[in-house]
Image: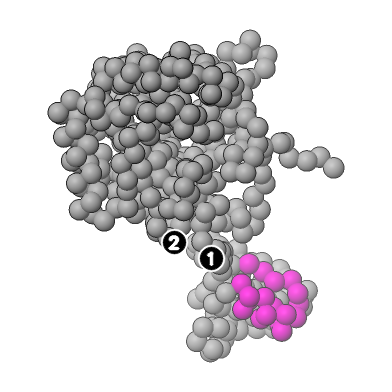
């Protein structure tokens, strides 16, 4: 038997339906906020990810799915933002009215060891806004994402946020962090020993807890300018005023090189290790220019569909069913399918039961939460059917054309 590739999953029936319902909620949410779709290709040039995500990042060093036969020029996308920025730069973002607000839904791929909550293929939903840079609009996006996740999951979630300041502040802090790690380098995991030289901030993002081995970690808040502190205070005040459950975490860095200023991630409140992040994002003000575009500020957030599904409260997932057509015998199958086709063409949900047994068909209709049972029998010869309304517990004979 041929099995699915390692690190992937199959979604069938109810599990697929739940994912469809959540993605529909994502899209409606984005469109209500005025965001428009942007769908870059599933694979891009490797150079894009090296420049955007960071050549020394785990993603580029270990997790890219290279496409064979092209001398490793192309790779499946490991995240969505880089492709979106590349597409907008190519299409002329400089002349587009600002802000440019986009949403992207699609699968991403990382060649890593599969484990609970981590897969080689997973689905992500991104929101990105380009050309607007103020604390209120950033806080507004975070508060909206918070409300969306609470509604979908059915319980509270928690936001952790921090600011990295300007690139200059970020670099000054990185230098101080490198000095603080100092003699404790030997206590770090093999990956973090390399990160100290290439990007020490990633040590604070290590999932193996290397930051606990450092000792006294400098606080980035000590290096922020007055304007940078005011920006964070404004975001915090807005979130407080709007009932958002959040915490400022001075050690939160996020793992991608392109982040500047505000960074945040969202987890379940009981996920003390924050090993299963539901959503994460931040500002990436230099990325558009870094990828040969204009100097445009930007903020984005990525939501992990798989993590959200795993944490969602159990609920009954039902596919909408309005009509079930029940031919009383095989003789009336043709009429039954013709009626179902007519209803489908009117955008009605309808299916045919081939039990050829009214009791069984009625039982199926009740289990499927269908409202109407259409009985196709002798009456069809006169272009009529018996329709039973299970909600109102009523029955009448009607013309097929009236359905």
- Residue 6 position by quadrant: top right
Q: Which residues are magenta?
A: 351-368
Name the one closer to the observer, 190 or 110: 190
Q: Which residue is mark 2?
A: 154
**Furthest residue in direction top, as rendered:** 71
Instruction: Using the image, tell me which numbered label, if any, was put on residue 212.
Output: none
Q: Above or below — where is 335 with respect to 122?
A: below
Proximity of marks 2 and 1: CB atoms separated by less than 8 Å: yes
SS of the residue under disc 2: loop
Which of these two is toward me, 303 or 342? 303
Residue 355 is inside the magenta segment: yes
Under tag 1, what secondary structure?
loop
Q: Which residue is mark 1?
A: 315
Residue at position x 62%, y 28% in the image: 111
Q: Residue sitting at 52 percent across and 54 percent down?
A: 311
Measured as percent of width and height from the top left, residue 380 is found at 65, 79
Going 64% across and 57% down the picture, which residue do you hit? 13
Q: Disc 2 and disc 1: Cα gap in Å?
A: 9 Å
In the image, residue 95 sits, relative to residue 310, either above or below, namely above
**First of labels 2, 1 by sequence position:** 2
- Residue under the point 37% across and 33% down: 251
**Percent position (x, y) of residue 85?**
38, 25
Q: Position of residue 361 (x, y in %)?
A: 69, 78
């Amino acid at each position: 038997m041929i099995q699915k590739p390692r690190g992937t999953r199959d979604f069938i029936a109810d599990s697929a339906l739940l994912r469809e319902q959540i993605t529909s909620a994502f899209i409606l949410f984005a469109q209500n906020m005025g965001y428009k779709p942007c769908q870059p290709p599933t694979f891009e040039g490797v150079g894009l990810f090296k420049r955007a995500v960071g050549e020394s990042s785990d993603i580029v060093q270990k997790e890219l799915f290279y496409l064979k036969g092209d001398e490793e020029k192309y790779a499946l996308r490991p995240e969505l933002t880089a492709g979106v920025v590349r597409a907008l730069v190519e299409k002329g973002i400089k002349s587009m009215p600002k802000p440019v607000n986009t949403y992207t839904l699609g699968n991403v791929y990382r060649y890593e060891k599969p484990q609970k909550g981590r897969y080689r293929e997973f689905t992500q939903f991104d929101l990105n806004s380009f050309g607007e840079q103020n604390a209120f609009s950033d806080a507004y996006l975070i508060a909206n994402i918070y409300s969306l996740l609470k509604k979908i999951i059915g319980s509270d979630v928690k936001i952790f946020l921090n600011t990295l300041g300007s690139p200059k502040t970020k670099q000054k802090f990185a230098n101080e962090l490198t000095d603080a790690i100092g003699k404790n380098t030997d206590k770090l995991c093999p990956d973090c020993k390399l990160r100290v030289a290439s990007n020490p901030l990633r040590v604070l993002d290590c999932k193996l807890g290397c930051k606990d081995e450092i000792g006294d970690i400098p606080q980035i808040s000590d290096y922020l300018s007055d304007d940078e502190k005011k920006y964070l205070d404004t975001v915090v005040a807005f979130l407080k005023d709007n009932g958002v459950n959040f915490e400022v975490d001075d050690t939160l860095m996020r793992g991608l090189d392109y982040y500047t200023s505000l960074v945040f991630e969202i987890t379940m409140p009981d996920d003390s290790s924050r090993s299963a992040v539901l959503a994460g994002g931040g500002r990436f003000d230099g990325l558009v220019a870094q990828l040969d575009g204009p100097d445009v500020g930007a903020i984005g957030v990525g939501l992990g569909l798989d993590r959200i599904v795993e944490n969602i409260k159990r609920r009954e997932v039902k596919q909408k069913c309005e009509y079930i057509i029940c031919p009383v015998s095989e003789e009336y199958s043709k009429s039954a399918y013709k009626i179902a086709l007519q209803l489908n063409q009117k955008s009605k949900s309808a299916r045919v039961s081939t039990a050829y047994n009214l009791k069984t068909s009625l039982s199926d209709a009740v289990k499927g939460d269908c409202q109407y049972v259409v009985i196709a029998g002798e009456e069809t010869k006169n272009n009529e059917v018996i329709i039973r309304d299970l909600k109102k517990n009523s029955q009448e004979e009607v013309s097929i054309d009236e359905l």
